[in-house]
Image (cartoon, helix red, strand yellow):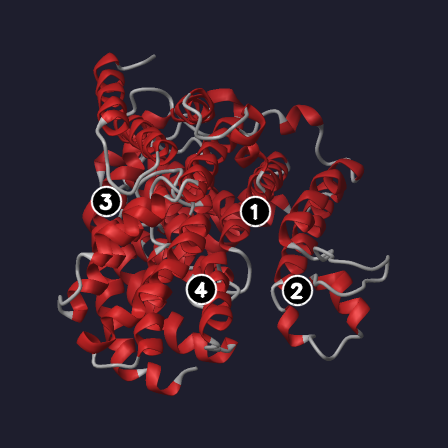
Amino acid sequence: MADRRSLLAAVVAFVAVAVVPVDGLSPAAQFALATAIFAGTLWVTGGLPLPITALTIPVLLTAFGVVPTTAAAVVGFADPIIFLLLAGFVLAEALQKHGTDRRIAYHVLASVRTSPRRIVLAVMLATAALSMVISNSATTAMMVPIAIGIADRVLEDAEVADGAGQATDASVSEMAVDEAEAGTGRGTVSDRSNFQLAMVLGVAYAASIGGVGTLIGTPPNAILVSQLSERLGYTITFGEWLLVGIPFVVVGLPLTWYVLAFVVYPPEVTDVSAARVEAQRYLQEAGAPSAAERRVLLITGLTAGLWLLGGLGFLFEGVLPSTWYVTLFGGADGNLFGAGPHQGALYYVTVGLAAIPALSIAGVLAWDDVQRIDWGTIVLLGGGITLANALAVTNATQWLAENAVGSLAGAPVLLVALAIAVITIAVSEIASNTAMAAISVPILIAMGPQYAEQFGADPITASVFLAVTGGIAASFGFALPVATPPNAIAFGTGEMTKDDMLRPGLVLDVAMAVVTAVLSYGLFTVVWPFVG
């Protein structure tokens, strides 16, 4: 149901932005910005359900002439990342259907002899490590069902212990999961516990942070490096990027864990010994996986392996014959099937999509199972991509960046870095991180020379500093489901409300803006002399 006050506020904001004349903005750009304000207001306030708000975006863009046709306005809903999200949801459904997520969760619980907070940290560390070599979206899709399974097991066993007078925290029983709901073993959103929220959000946030660590971890990194090479002739190798990216992971991951597990969502249960005992008992009684479960594991494992292999193409360049390399990893040269550009059979979206018919052919997933995935989240992400595309083609984002950062000429270096980080993260909350990097990095590179003197550096180094700060900040949107694919995947589990993500997300947005500014400045003074 619509919140009339929020809807009215969104309409007023839209009209105000659309009708007030602004120098340097075309009418189309003003209406694109007005649409962003309208959608952002409703996403933050919850005035309409999030997917329905996403569907208003192509309507407004078409009605006010930002794009020429409805066909152009809905292109974002067919973006490749949408289909990767679909593949992740389907794989997760297969794992849950056959109890594989439960089995993996119990294995983790049986081996991690520690506190709930440290379980959250262990899962986040595993997620971050995977996201350095597999796309952060694919990593989140794999890890979220495991995180949910672990949380469910811990809380169920804590509830049993509480009923027997053994629990250390009586509040656990109040947060217990309603196993009867829809036969899924999950409760309503209102039943979600702090531990569950910390686990699921921890996976999403760790995937985004871990992706910064390597060149292949997240698309903004690749966009940044390719733009530096193309526009400045400035090359950063895979190894050199580690000097840049790993510090953000080392600082950002424990900070995020602390915010989730100590500040916003401290676990209600403090003892997981009952869960460990239950995990060991379950694994003994369950025995070996069934034939269907083994097929699910095989397909999931192959998909993950191919995702990993697809991100390691640089290792095979110059080793494989050119046609084989292009066929597997993509390129502009000839491939095994003819001449011309080729996406590459190991492109991560292609691999993810291939897993869906593979599951069906293997007889482990029916169409009825696929229908249960969260299609609303897919619509939500499509709306975010559509909005980002509109802001880009009308140059609205360029206008925002130039006016915001350009006004800081003469300011201290650290203040410039902080402004870039804050602006980038804020805009990334309503525009995809990939789109934000693609738009902002060229602008920041072009603005570098006017800051060279105050930075005490040559124009190229100044451009690199600005671009790296903005490119990395693009990955740090934590407050809204539409901000990043990992956020969308986490929200799509149904384990949280929008506000559940917003609370820690806003804190982390501010914290990571400061971290980005400080680390970028430190890298600028210490690392850049040895890179490029």
Q: Where is mark 4, residue-wise? A: 224
Q: Amino acid at mark 4?
A: Leu
Q: Which mark is residue 103?
A: 1
For discs 4 and 1, the disc positioned in front in the rendered view: 4
Point 63% across, 56% down: residue:
304
Picture residue at 52% right of the left edge, 32% below the top: 378
Question: Does residue 185 appear in the picture of this structure?
Answer: no
User: Label for residue 309?
Assistant: 2
Give the percent coordinates (x, y) of residue 349.
63, 48
Nearer the viewer's eye, disc 1 or disc 2?
2
Q: Is residue 485 left or right of residue 470?
A: right
Report how far apart the C-alphas of labels 2 and 3 lie in the structure.
Answer: 35 Å
Specify the farthest residue to the right.
337
Disc 3 or disc 1, which is closer to the eye?
A: 3
C-alpha distance separating marks 4 and 3:
25 Å
Can you give x and y, in whole percent of width and height, for residue 266 in the image? 23, 46
Which of the two labelled residues, at mark 4 and mark 1, occupies the earlier sequence position? 1
Type of amino acid at the residue the image marks with label 3: Leu
**Three-letter amino acid code at disc 1?**
Arg
Q: Which mark is residue 506?
A: 3
Q: Is residue 281 above or below residue 230?
A: above
Count of labels in the image:
4
Label 2: how many Cα within 10 Å (few below 14, some 14–19, many 20+): some
Q: Quadrant of the C terminus?
A: bottom left
